Image (spheres, rainbow, N blue to C red):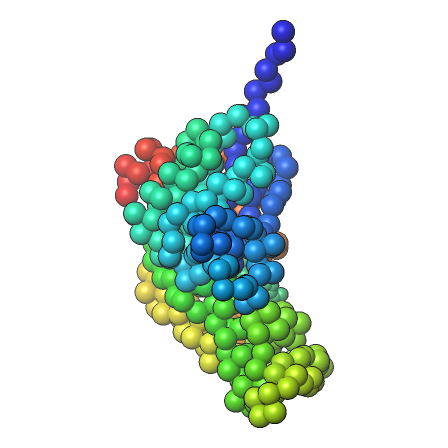
């Protein structure tokens, strides 16, 4: 007779607007894929999920659409989000893991109805019990901040679709906001700038490449350049030009200031004792957008509070969701956890 080992485990999922990460206890982050689904509109069948689907964005024939179902931090399409989530859970767990406990981190703007849809998807994928955690709480835990004490902590998570700003204390959120200015808006600003300043039409991917490689929030000691290709709007033909980081700084300035203003607004709403704690410890930034060159320095200058980019900024939320499962009794605002919901 075969003895069954207990393969029960905890899984944390970061259901982000730009990417989904899956964290398995003792294994770390086992999956990181773009939150994109490609669908054949004739048959309503899913053709690809993740990186494969992302490659199709902007390159599909009429009957195929590539969708980012969480683009603006709200679940614009329930059933596609559910199918994507199930797909990712099944690819990472296969049949090896027996009914795991799953904690999903969702953007803080999602509604109760949207949370139920996520829970349902997790259950259908074979979990024993679904839990939902709001992203800023998971981000703070993942950044190794001790949020369980009566002390103020501030986390700014800059993702693709949303920037989540939150002050946490005693395992819960004290003040927070979610603004729809983040990585995607940086890309859009770059596209607009290229069109206006150079009459050049570039795609989303090129804009993102520019942002990641030479994007700048604070003047660099040495300017860096990158060659990019687009379509000349006058001749209609492909054209290559060289772009410098100072130009990127101008293109991104307005979007960056909107995010920093959002941080300042939350600081102003923070009770004074907690604000004093934050001045001591500094603000922690997480998410891919936090990696924009010089954003920490500029935010520090504009808020007067030290700013740190969390280590592993991109995987903080995933790691935090996993870690949250181990500390359920210390946390509030977690859907699915009877104990914590008493307080909310
Ligand atoms: P989400 O949590 O919304 O899924 P992520 O935290 O994964 O988002 O961040 C995705 C965003 O971060 C994208 O807009 C991506 O272009 C941006 N990003 C990733 N790396 C960098 C970088 N080095 N510099 C600037 N932006 C980056
Ligand atoms: Mg995120």
| Residue drawn at the location 57% of the way across and 82% of the way down | 201
Residue drawn at x 69%, y 84% as measured from the top left: 240
Q: Is residue 99 above or below residue 53?
A: above
Foreground pick, 68 / 285: 68
Residue farthest toward the bottom in the current orientation of the protein = 234
Task: Name the image quarter holding residue 179.
Answer: bottom left
Q: In the rendered picture of this protein, how many numbered marks are placed on residues?
A: 0
Q: Residue furthest top?
A: 1
Q: Position of residue 271 (x, y in %)?
A: 33, 60
Q: Can residue 328 be seen in this snapshot?
A: no
Q: Residue 154 appears at what percent x and percent y?
A: 45, 58
Q: Which of the 4 quarters of the picture holds residue 224?
A: bottom right
For ligand 1, give the image quadrant: bottom right
Task: Determine the residue positioned at 46% across, 44% down.
Answer: 83
Taking the view exactly as shown, the residue that stands out farthest to the front is 42
Rendered view: 112 above or below 120: below
Identify the image quadrant of the N terminus: top right
Looking at the rendered image, the quarter that the C terminus falls into is: top left
Q: Nearer the viewer, residue 42 or 70?
A: 42
Q: Is residue 59 above or below residue 14?
A: below
Residue 69 relative to residue 239: left or right: left
Tell me where residue 264 appears, x and y as whole percent. 40, 70
* Left or right position of 33 against 213: left
Q: Residue at x 67, y 85 (%)?
A: 239
Would you say residue 31 is visible in this rendering? yes
Residue 76: x and y, percent?
Answer: 37, 57
């Amino acid at each position: 007779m075969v003895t069954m080992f207990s393969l029960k485990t905890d899984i944390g999922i970061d259901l982000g607007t730009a990417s989904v990460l899956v964290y398995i206890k003792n294994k770390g982050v086992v999956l990181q894929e773009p939150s994109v689904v490609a669908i054949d509109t004739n048959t309503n069948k899913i053709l690809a999920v993740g990186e494969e689907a992302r490659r199709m964005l902007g390159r599909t024939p009429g009957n195929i659409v590539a969708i980012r179902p969480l683009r603006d931090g709200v679940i614009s399409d329930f059933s596609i989000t559910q199918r994507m989530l199930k797909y990712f859970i099944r690819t990472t767990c296969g049949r090896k893991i027996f009914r795991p406990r799953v904690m999903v981190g969702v953007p803080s703007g999602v509604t109760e109805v949207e949370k139920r849809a996520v829970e349902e998807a997790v259950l259908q994928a074979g979990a024993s019990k679904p839990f939902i955690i709001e992203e800023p709480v998971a981000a703070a835990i993942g950044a190794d901040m001790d949020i369980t004490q009566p002390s103020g902590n501030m986390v700014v998570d800059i993702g693709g679709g949303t920037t989540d700003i939150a002050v946490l204390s005693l395992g819960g959120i004290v003040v927070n906001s979610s603004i729809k200015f983040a990585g995607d808006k940086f890309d859009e600003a770059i596209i607009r700038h290229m069109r206006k300043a150079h009459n050049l039409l570039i795609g989303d991917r090129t804009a993102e490449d520019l942002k990641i490689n030479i994007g700048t929030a604070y003047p660099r000691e040495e300017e860096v350049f990158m060659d990019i290709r687009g379509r000349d709007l006058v001749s209609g033909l492909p054209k290559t030009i060289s772009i410098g980081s100072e130009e990127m700084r101008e293109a991104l300035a307005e979007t960056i200031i909107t995010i920093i203003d959002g941080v300042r607004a939350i600081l102003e709403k923070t009770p004074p004792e907690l604000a004093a704690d934050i001045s001591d410890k500094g603000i922690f930034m997480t998410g891919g957008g936090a990696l924009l060159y010089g954003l920490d320095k500029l935010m520090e200058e504009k808020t007067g509070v030290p700013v740190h980019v969390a280590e592993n900024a991109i995987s903080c939320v995933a790691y935090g969701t996993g870690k949250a499962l181990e500390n359920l009794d210390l946390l509030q605002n977690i859907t699915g956890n009877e104990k914590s919901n008493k307080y909310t």
